[in-house]
Amino acid sequence: MVQSRVGVLNKACAILAVLEEGPTCLGAVVSETGLKRSTVHRLVLAMEELGLVEVDPQGQFIVGPRLIRLAMAAQRAIADLELRQELSALRATTGVRSVRLEQRCGDQRICIAEDQRLKSAASGRNPSRAVAMGEDPVSRVFLAWRGLGQGHAVWSDAAACSGTRCRGWVQGVADGCLVLAVAVEGGDGDLPAVLSLSSPLQRTRRQASYGREVITVAMEAAARISGRLRAKEAAGLVKGLEDRARGVGPQPVQ
C-alpha cells in the first residue's frame, strides 16, 4: 500500500484497506494491519464518529456511510470529466464551433455541458440559462419524445415526431447557425438529454447541411454519453437510497 508522510493517515488507510474486504472484527483488523490493539481501537472509534467506519448488527466493523457518499461523489466527478472529454473530442473530430449537451426542465431546456472553439460576446452568457422550447432542432428532438402541455403552440406534427424518433436526429437553422440535434436515449426508451452541434452558416451556403459522416460520429458519441449519464444517475440513486436507509444526510468533508 502506498504510504504518505503522515503516519496517522497511513494507519487509518491500513484499517480501511482491511474493511474493503468485508465486515471484520477488531482482532482481525489488528492482525491484518500489524498495529497495536489500542491504536486500532482508538482510530476505529474516531473514524466511527466521522462516519468513515460503522458497526454492523453482528458487532463487526464495516465501511461507513460517509465513505460511500465520497465514493459516489467520485464516480459522478469521473463521469462529468469523461463527459467533457467526450464533447471536446466530438468538436475536434467534426470541426464544428460548439457542442452542447442539454436536458429538459418542464417546458424549458437547459445546457448542462458545452465545449466551444470560439468565445464571443454572444457566447459569454450563462450556458446554464433555461431556454423555452421552440421550433429549433434541439426542441424538436425533445418534443418528438414528449410534447408540451396544452396551451403551448409548438412543433407537434405527429408524422414528423415519429420520423424523428425513428431517425434519432434533426438538423436545421437556429440563431444563424446550422444545428444538428441528436437524441441521447435512456435505457428505458426515455430521453434524458439532447446532444447538439452548431456552426455559423456560410453566406453562400444558406441551405448547407451536415453530412452523413458527421451525423454518424455524433450518434456514436450520443450512445456513449447515454451510458455515462446512466452510470451517473445510478450513482445518485444509490447515494439517495443509502442516505435514506441509514437516516443520514450529506455532511461536509472536514
Image (spheres, helix red, strand yellow):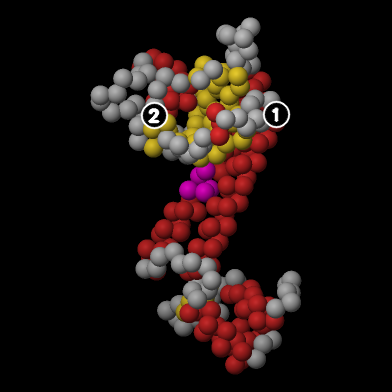
Rate crowding at label 1 as few (under 14), some (14 to 19) or many (20 or more) other CA atoms within 10 Å.
few
The disc at residue 241 is none
Dot 2 lies on which element?
strand
Q: Residue 209: where, in percent of width, then height?
A: 59, 14
User: Would residue 61 be seen by someone viewing this image from the given angle?
Assistant: no
Residue drawn where x is 48% and y is 67% of the image? 252
Dot 1 lies on which element?
helix
Q: In this view, does 145 lie above or below 225?
A: above
Which of the marked residues, 1 or 2, is nearer the chain's N terminus? 1
Determine which residue is flagged by label 2: 132
What type is the residue that disc 1 sits on?
Thr
Find the magenta span and give its range.
Answer: 229-233
**Magenta: main secondary structure:** helix
Is mark 1 in CB contact (under 8 Å) with mark 2?
Answer: no
Indicate which label's residue lies in the foreground, 1 or 2: 2
What type is the residue that disc 2 sits on?
Ala
Q: Residue 236: where, in percent of width, then height?
A: 46, 53
The alpha-carbon separation of the residues under discs 1 and 2 comes to 30 Å
Q: Judge from the rendering whether residue 62 lies leftward or rightward of residue 214; answer left or right.
A: left
The disc at residue 93 is 1
Q: Residue 99: where, in percent of width, then height?
A: 59, 31
